[in-house]
Amino acid sequence: MPGLPVTERLVIAIDGPSGSGKSSTSRGVADRLGLAYLDTGAMYRAATWLVLHHGLTDPDVVASRVAAAAMDFVTDPSAPTISIDGTDVTEAIRAPEVSRAVSSVATNLAVRQDLVARQQAIVAAAEHGIVVEGRDITTVVAPDADVRVLLVADPAARVARRQAELGDRVDHAAVTDQVIRRDRDDSTVAAFTEAAPGVTVVDSTELSLEQVIDVICGLVPEHSGA
Ligand code: DC
């Protein structure tokens, strides 16, 4: 039937480095298409919050404590939240100490295995479909997604965006560290700097948020002519 989606459930996978505009873009796409939204980075951040909260350092202890933790999400793109072991950490996971420590948890392979399985379960349970953002979504979490995008932007633009988000709370050197050093560390375990076969690269450097959302919605066959 013309005008009706070909796929009943639409899965959109969006990878990219810090400051590429992934979160705002993914939420905007989910909102426009009426899909759920999952920020997998928030899961790594919540695990890191737990690890810092309990003062854990040993990688095996970290992995087993994270595996035992309950994580709950609200996947509404207009108000996403995340809780771990019953504590809502939506705000707390954005603290600088979590940003500084998150790569060490995200590079723990046992933690990754656990969180990837949880992410795949959330994708499978999304009734009408979902937009999932992260670093390994197009390659590991949802390689069969209907739309697969690698969102990139020049390093200077990414640092400037993160600085604008964080404001004067964090100085320029710390923001540069968060964006550039973290990507270098993270890229040792997730290949998000180059597009895998079949993944569309979208460069957001010169585009507004609305333009990036338009481009990605245009990749959905049913919406390309809308
Ligand atoms: O996107 P973000 O800055 O909130 O991500 C937080 C951290 O988690 C970052 O260090 C990258 C890592 N991450 C990952 O390794 N794999 C994902 N799918 C998502 C995030």
Image (cartoon, rainbow, N blue to C red):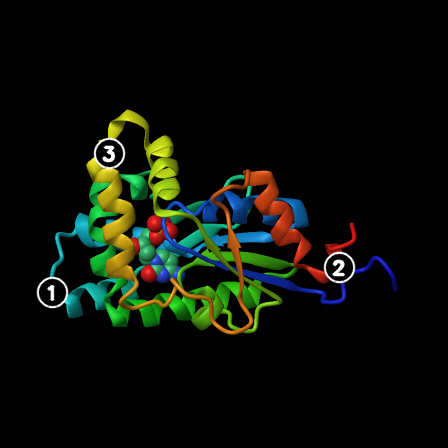
Q: Which picture quadrant has residue 3?
A: bottom right
Residue 140 seen in the figure = yes
Under circle 1, the secondary element is: loop
Decide if residue 209 is on the left or right side of residue 9: left
Q: CA distance from mark 1 to mark 3?
A: 31 Å
Give the secondary structure at mark 2.
helix
N-terminal-most mark, 2 or 3: 3
Q: Within 10 angstroms of label 2, few (less than 14), some, or many (20 or more) residues? A: some
Read off the residue under disc 2: 222
Location of mark 3 (residue): 172
Mark 2 sits near ligand 1, with its Cβ under 8 Å away:
no
**Left or right: 83 with respect to 109?**
right
Q: How many marks?
A: 3
Q: CA distance from mark 2 to mark 1?
A: 48 Å
The answer to whether marks 2 and 3 mark residues whose Cβ atoms lie closer than 8 Å is no
Can residue 86 be seen here? The reply is no
Residue toward you, 88 or 177: 177
Residue at mark 1 = 58
Badge 1: how crowded within 10 Å, few (<14), some, or many (20+)?
few
Q: Amino acid at mark 3?
A: His
The x, y position of residue 185, in whole percent, is 24, 60
Mark 1 or 3: the one toward you: 3
Q: Residue furthest right?
A: 1
Q: Amino acid at mark 2?
A: Glu
Q: Position of residue 51 (x, y in %)?
A: 20, 54
* Vertical side of 174 occupied by 141: above or below: below
Give 131 or 197, whichever is nearer the viewer: 197
Q: Residue 219's spot in the image, x, y percent?
A: 65, 58
Position of 78 relative to 196 (above/below): above
Look at 53% across and 67% down and name the residue there. 199
Q: Residue at x 48, y 67 (%)?
A: 138
